[in-house]
Image (cartoon, coloured by chain):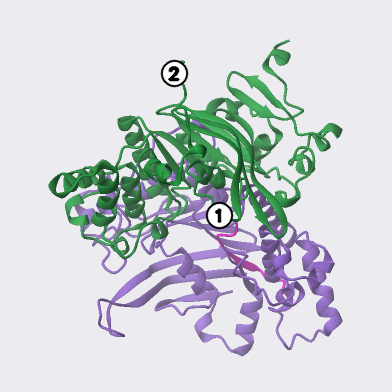
Amino acid sequence: MTLEGHDLRKYFPAARGLALGRARGVVKALDGVSVRVAEGETLGIVGESGSGKTTLARLFLLLERPTAGSLLFDGKATMSFGRGDLARYRRAVQAVFQDPYSSLNPRMRVGQIVAEPLPGDNGMNGTAVRERVGEVLQLVGLRRDSAGLYPHEFSGGQRQRIAIARALVTTPKFIVLDEPVSALDVSIRAQILNLLKGLQERLGLAYMMISHDLAAARYLATRLAVMYAGQLVETGECDALYREPLHPYTQALLSAALPLHPSARRQRIVLAGEVPNPMSPPPGCRFHPRCSHAMPQCGTVEPALRQVRPGRFTACHLY
Amino acid sequence: MGDAPPLLEVDNLQTHFFTRRGVTKAVDGVSFTLRAGETLALVGESGSGKSITCLSLVRLVPEPAGRIVGGRVLLDGEDLLRKTAAQMRRVRGKQIAMVLQDPMTSLNPGLTIGSQLGEVVRLHQGLRGAPLRGRVLEALSRLRIPGAASRLTHYQHQLSGGMRQRVSSAIAMSCTPRLLIADEPTTALDVTIQAQYLELLKEVQQATGVAVILVTHDFGIVAANADRVAVMYAGRIVEIGCTLDVFNTPAHPYTRALLRCLPDVDLKRERLVEIGGQPPDLARLPAGCPFAPRCPERQSRCDTAYPPAVAVDDAHVAHCWVALPAAARSR
């Protein structure tokens, strides 16, 4: 099974000034992104705020419709889905969000929260549902009798486990992890990252992990996609990409991540300026105003994402 | 280092919160010193007491629930805990300045950048008119805010996150304080903007000689920016020392566990070594070492008495029954 996005675009209308309700421009949150997640792998999607990572996740969760481009599930476009296909898709593609304090309904018991993704016509009676809920709670390292408690009775790490149990209850193939450990304390992050890795090995899950935490992404991801201003700038096998980033933005991004040892100080590439305004991105390569390798053509010709090494794609005129 | 008396000396600081659930010992006997020009990082998880320690230094603990119940905070030999409210107002902003996590909430959305900065300079330095404007522009350009003059009439919503944090740092540094407390200053920023900001902070520190207390939960920031580091757990400093020493030879099992459980951008780890359990409930602290229930090296005495300070090396101290003093190790 594969999950694939082809040339995805998502433009949001933006009102400027006091022209109430009158769209005067568009924010190009996502501008031509193609990604593919295969069974059992983890695609890490990294980038800074505003790069479009979360919009991409929302498209895959069918929470937003793409402005253009298509989503393919096992080769079939989601646009042409019938009722049955849609239900099948929702069971197969689940999500875990960043903040377990806001992603769990405080008025529902854990049992109800975890059972909620099960469709109403699942053909399971109450006992079978309870059995399944108990099973996934154990899978994530919680006690079966947690089902009767409310979210406030749990700590942040345990709440994230509940959110993971909820994602697992429909036996999905893909889980979109949107910053799964960013809201957690450092000593708890390792617990959740290990849990996610263990579940993947046991259940053969594929993850799409959205993260701005480059260390966490490196731990979990097998492949990495780097985004900048709504586009992919580089994709490739995770380890190779960390060892030798090719795109100047990837180089700067990775050099800005702080290694965990004082003597491991490396050459930091400190970027000047800021991420471009998504309403009027610069022409040509969107990174060129901040790029130290910029050439004349960078300001006029948009570089295409091309394979420059086996398995490595980069959108840069240098290669 | 030199024998000059430290700029800041915190001695057995205790800040407790009195709630219906009982007494929460948010800061429970914290001691450290800081020299001019030095950066001390306070690291720890949420609830470890790092922010309350900082608020206690400037006497801004939320009252009446919270109260500083003991200890001394000596700035240049003067005990801040004995000053009157009016005296304290002259210390804050002038001698000790703060930069908070979220510039969105620490800047006033209804005032222009110029008037917010001008207010601080006017109050503490009594400047007006052209000299005031000059000092304000100088403060902004020290933090490398491009087009400083045109920013004066801007409001915070017109600035990006990184720029906002620079503006609040410009406000903090405008009266050339002796001590800057930066509480998670880059948590709300993106990595590349964080790198810009941390570089800038170092530059400003070198230019002005300000001492910095950097509160963070990110060991990467500690490794990159701090001269010394204090690791906090359950309201106490469990280990303190030079950054390099603490990273190379962590003496407290909590520090060791923390350093092992973090994913690193520099290497792919097969499996992270977890710290089991949860941080303790501060209202129901165990009798002995609060880390004991999660500690892999726990002994029976850990449950009964809080471990004394063990000097594991020069200026490297850990509170642990298992830690060995330098003298004992060399034998």
| Residue A233 appearing in the image | yes
- Look at the image and give the residue range highlighted in magenta: A170-182
Depth check: give the residue in front, A30 or B18: B18
Residue at coordinates 59% horizontally, 48% vertically from top-left?
Answer: B67
Q: Give amino acid for label 1.
A: Glu
Whether B180 is drawn above or below A177: the answer is: above
Observer-side mark, 2 or 1, equals 1
Which residue was labeled with disc 2?
B4
- Of all chains in the rendering, the one displayed in purple is A
Residue of label 1:
B63
Q: In the rendered image of this protein, does residue B157 appear above or below residue B314?
A: below
Looking at the image, the residue that sits furthest to the left is B130
Residue in the foreground of this view, choosing between A84 and B128: B128
Q: Magenta includes A177? A: yes
Question: What color is chain B drawn in?
Answer: green
Residue A120: x, y in percent? 72, 87
Q: Earlier in the sequence, mark 2 or mark 1?
A: 2
| Outermost top residue | B331
Name the chain letter of the residue that bears numbered label 1: B
Q: For the residues tagged 2 and 1, is the chain the same? A: yes
Chain to which mark 2 belongs: B
User: Residue drawn at (49%, 49%), measured in percent from left and top?
Assistant: B60
Q: CA distance from mark 2 to mark 1?
A: 35 Å
Residue A300: which quarter of the image?
bottom left
Q: In which quarter of the view is residue B42 placed? A: top right
Q: In the picture, residue A200 is in which quadrant?
A: bottom right
Horizontal relation, residue A271 to residue A259: left or right = left
Mark 1: secondary structure:
loop
Q: Amino acid at mark 2?
A: Ala
Q: Residue at x 52, y 51 (%)?
A: A213
